[in-house]
Amino acid sequence: MSVQQWSETVLLGELGDDPQFTDDLSAIIEQCTRDPRQDVLLNLGTLNYLNSSNIAQLLKLRKLVTITNHRRLKLAGVNTQVWGVFLVTGLDRIFDFADDVPSGLAGLQMGA
């Protein structure tokens, strides 16, 4: 599994293409349901495509983390092809992005 507890309140997920994407995101959703104190950073640097099921899972995680748990979710390292999906679907306006994992972690630690 590519999910690790980076700090006491930050989960770091390294997401790749399916089926790993679905499995890892399901594990993150489960962990955030059990422990609502978690901020989440998803590294999408090795992700090459998003399908509608992946988008639905991301939206479910966003709702759980930001609305239900009142925590933060950041997406980092999004490549050009995947960024195009976010732009076309309008999801670029509802997710918080960081250029890379260190920037995302710093943003979560600083409360930005």
Image: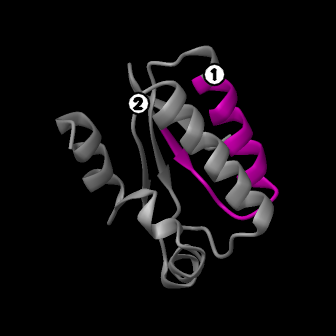
Magenta span of residues = 12-32
Mark 1 or mark 2: name the one nearer the start of the chain: 1
Tell me, yes or no, whether the two marked residues, 1 and 2, touch with CB atoms within 8 Å.
no
- Predominant secondary structure, magenta span: helix
Residue furthest to the left in view is 110
Q: Report the residue marked by disc 2.
A: 71
Question: From what the image shows, is residue 21 above or below residue 47?
Answer: above
Pick the quarter of the image with the C terminus.
top left
Seen at 64% across and 75% down, the residue is 48
Q: Nearer the viewer, residue 69 or 46?
A: 69
The x, y position of residue 8, in whole percent, is 38, 19
Q: Which numbered circle lies on residue 33?
A: 1
Local packing at callout 2 (Cα closer than 10 Å; few below 14, some 14-19, many 20+) is some
Q: Amino acid at mark 2?
A: Arg
The x, y position of residue 87, in whole percent, is 51, 79
Q: Quadrant of residue 38?
A: top left
